[in-house]
Image (cartoon, helix red, strand yellow):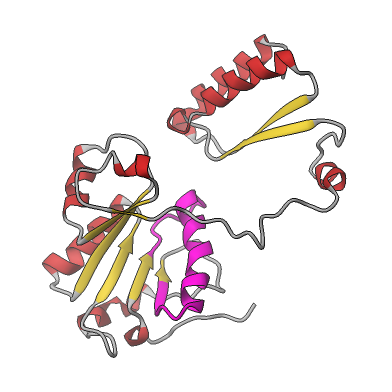
Amino acid sequence: MTSLYHSNIDEIDVIAPNFKRRLSGVTSTIIQLLPLQASMGLKIAALGPGLPHHLPFIRFRDLWRIWIKPAGSPLRVWHARRNVEMVAGILMRDVLRMPLKLVFTSASQRKHKNFTRFLIEQMDAVIATSAKTARYLTVPNHIILHGIDTRKFVPPIDKAAAKYAVSLDPERYHVGCFGRIRHQKGTDLFVDSMIFAMAKNSKWDAVIAGRATAEHLAFERMLKSRVKEAGLE
């Protein structure tokens, strides 16, 4: 794929930092959104490791040029999605006095810790990805729902072949839970629900796909024990 690399930060109005090398939901969001936003005429670029090279991006060594206003605009937008990215934006705006506006998108559906809440309060604008997410915010915000690319995510023409390709029994029905395995994401609720449902209907299988980080391995083992005790492993 042809690279959309912008070597000249002077042409960029919005910077989307990604300060996490490991693939996560936030990283995936950036990967999916940036090409769409760029195709709509937004002068946007990513910054950080772990991103595919087809994305528009800038280099860390170009950041000093944020002191120079972009062509045709009085300032730039720094669109953070993590604490560390909010911290970087605050340092550039308030300490280095760079002409930046800070935007934070919150997708978490839990009470924020004091430090996170403090950082969010320093933002110029805040986006919530759902009404439930917005209820955990203590600052004014705009709700912008996550979208789905219906050109990419469509039912396969041959469902049996699609199931066979990922080692699923084409003769059975399947329901899935996808994402990191952790209590906050409700993986245990899915497991308990499927144990209940599958006891009443033997034609269904449940699939969990996701990574358990070190602090959640005990939680993952507990879930596997529940499944084993139910005779459904």
Residue 38: within the magenta? yes
Up/down of 7 relative to 116, above or below: below
The answer to which image quadrant residue 17 occupies is: bottom left
**Quarter of the rendering containing residue 144:** bottom left
- In this view, the residue farthest toward the top is 229
Q: Position of residue 142 (x, y in %)?
A: 30, 55
Q: x and y percent of residue 185 in the render?
A: 47, 33
Task: Check the picture and name the quadrant holding the N terminus.
Answer: bottom right
Q: What span is colored magenta in the figure?
A: 17-45
Residue 226 point in image, percent of width and height: 60, 14
Residue 66, above or below 228? below
Residue pictured at 44% horizontal, 83% vertical: 6
Position of 56 with respect to 190 (left or right) is left
In the displayed structure, 170 sits above or below 53; it is above
Which image quarter is the C terminus in?
top right
Residue 141, percent across and down? 26, 53
Task: Please indicate whether residue 65 sits to the left or right of residue 190 in the image.
Answer: left
Residue at image point 56% right, 74% down: 54
In the rendered structure, the answer to whether residue 121 lies left or right of residue 88 reads left
Count of marks overlaid on the render: 0
**Which residue is at the far bottom?**
71
Nearest the viewer among 158 and 122 is 158
Is residue 1 on the magenta stretch?
no
| x 61%, y 81%: residue | 2
Which residue lies at the image location 12% right of the left edge and 66% below the top edge?
95
Is residue 108 or residue 212 the one in the foreground?
108
